[in-house]
Amino acid sequence: MKRPASFFNFAIFKSDLKRFWWVSALYSILIFVSCLLPFYITYQGYVVGKALPAERTYLNSNILNYSIFPYFLLAIIAVGTAVLLFSYLNSKSAVAQIHSVPVKRETLFITHTVFGLLTLIVPVLINAVILLLMRTNPSISQVVSVAHIVQWAHTQMSYAVIGFSFAVFIGMFTANSVAHIIFTYIFALLPLAFELAIRGLMNLHLHGYYFYGAGISATTDFLYFGIDKLCTVTYPLIYLAYSIIFLVLSLFVYKLRDLENTAEVIAFPKLKPVFVYGVSLCMGVMGYFYLVAIADITSMFLILPFGILGLIIANMVAKKAFTLKGSIKPAVALLISALAFVLLFEADITGFEKRVPKSTDIESVSVTRRSIEMLTQVRSINGAQKIEKGEYIPNLYDSEDIENVIKFHSFKTQDKKESKDKIDPIYITYNLKNGKKMVRQYSVNLRTEQDLLKPIIETDEYKRHILPVISGETENVETVNISDARFRDYRKYFAEKQEDKEVINRICEALKKDIENAKYDEFAYGESTLTTIEIEELIPWYYEGTDILVPSEERYGGYTEYYSYSVRPSYENTIAVLYELGLYDAIPAVESYNKASIRVNDFTKNADTKVMVTKEVDKEENADLIIDNPDEILMLYKYVTETTPNRYDAHRDENGYGAFDITFSGPNVNSFSTSRTTHDESLPEMLKELLIK
């Protein structure tokens, strides 16, 4: 009677154990020395009850701080174990010897795989038991819990299993140990590199593309799981499923493999042209980004120089000879890829750049100076989402506002010319009725594109986005600091929530009224004035995911944010409150200043359009112009205190800069300075005659 087939062979397992027992022993020692020992030395002497108590989550535990090296160590040990166990496939004599015994390939594969998994898992379990024994010390038990140890062990094992399984899978396609190691690491990072390369190409060629629109990497949601995700139930099971798939596919490829193809970089001859093409394309794309970085050229055909070089090298490696034979097909594929990139990114055959949604398809739209991802930051706390309140997101629902955004967006689809004066980013985020989002990013000139931006930026929603005080909410305000360059005491007024709540409410309410009435020119450019109000807020955390424990609110209650507001000449309500508080009593009278010094900025002097200096330069004060006439000083004082500065164009004028500093000084007062520009609409005639050609 025929005996049933066995999928496990104890003799082969014992042979593996005899040859490679040291891997497991070394791994156990390295974990203990790099993690457990320093952890124990640090905390074994803590006085019970006075040390920090054990955190409720592993991600905030003390043991995690000592576990980083073992996690990285796994990347070496897991791959190395797979290479050692299947290295016999790379030697003709070893293959002939092992496959001469009456054991099926399935049995060989499964036995080696079981040994490899145990080699990686047993050291983790041994050290987990040691950690449990350490808890007999009361000092250790108060800083690390049993739950922490369990999570420490299963995250280590999750990475070990997925790393080993993937390395085995890659090893089935090569018959060279060095190539096995290199290919494993390359293919492990290839999905991330591929995604970032595509997004980088889109960022260079597609006008309006937002590089971080899907986060740093969308592949992290499906392939690369951090420790925070592995502390949950779902993601370790996903990694387990991936591991099973890799091992099943590995067995399938192993059975198809021609065992006579040893010492080959690619074990399957039919895959060699694919290997050559893949290497050439990867080198071509990397070379493209290198050439773009050093030369002002972005043609997609720049893929070809380095791509051809990669093709030649890969073909010689695959053939193990200095030859170009067999490189025609990969070369044609590389050329077709370059043409495809041209069509996708330069010709934009997908219509990405011109795509503007219909108003009937839009639920709401946001126009912001920073991306939505930056405004709402999320941190995962053991699976629960810890979210910063962040800045207010100005969602526009009114049909007229949506039409204004569409009009601006349509203009930007045609305005592809990049220039030095377009340095302010604008993000458009459409929330579509079908549940999807559409994001575009453009560089704008807030002054030259004012007609299109004004109806958007003057909305209350946008004002609240950049000037949060307009919300009227003061419960989170901790302090208010009012300063003015003219104050004798720079920090003249400092209000605290506990003692000056009424004053804080009055200042915030006055600012709110003035900002609501402010026009585009008064707040769009973000230029500072002499008087500024700094509001400190304590922003609370809030959580999503109540089924998982999160750190205590007492220790992680929130974070501090500071908002600075410039008091414009038109802010009548705010100025009135400041007068009522007596703050402006600290400002010296204009008669106290007997000198006004004007210094032209260095970049202005180096510009093509030179600034004229018609009076004698004061070398000692490093000034280009000294004014001591009382009437002229009064005129300049009114100019800097009663008009809004416009330094915006001064830093963007391609024909020459016009920025300068004015410093007022006197015998019994502190001097103060302010920056202005010859582009100011309110620039006095006297300065026009003196400073502009």
Image (cartoon, rainbow, N blue to C red):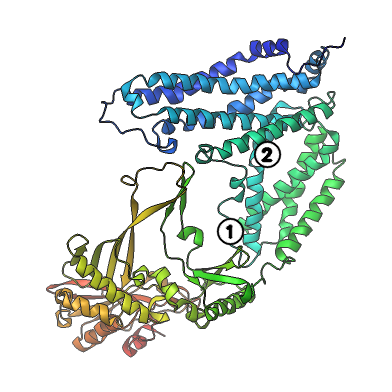
Residue depicted at 29% across the width and 80% down the height: 571
Image location of residue 675, percent across then percent down: 33, 74
Residue depicted at 76% across the width and 40% down the height: 313
**Amino acid type shown at disc 1:** Phe
Q: Are marks 2 and 1 in contact (CB under 8 Å)?
A: no
Image location of residue 373, percent across then percent down: 50, 58
Mark 2: secondary structure? helix
Image location of residue 301, percent across then percent down: 74, 58
The part of the image, by quadrant, that contains residue 606 is bottom left
Label placed on residue 211: 1
Horizontal arrangement in the rendering, residue 442 relative to residue 257 (left or right): left
Q: Residues under labels 2 and 1: Cα distance?
A: 23 Å
Horizontal arrangement in the rendering, residue 8 relative to residue 331 (left or right): left
Image location of residue 547, percent across then percent down: 46, 44
Label placed on residue 187: 2
**Amino acid type shown at disc 2:** Phe
Q: Residues within 10 Å of mark 1 (few under 14, many from 20)?
A: many
Above or below for 517 versus 143: below
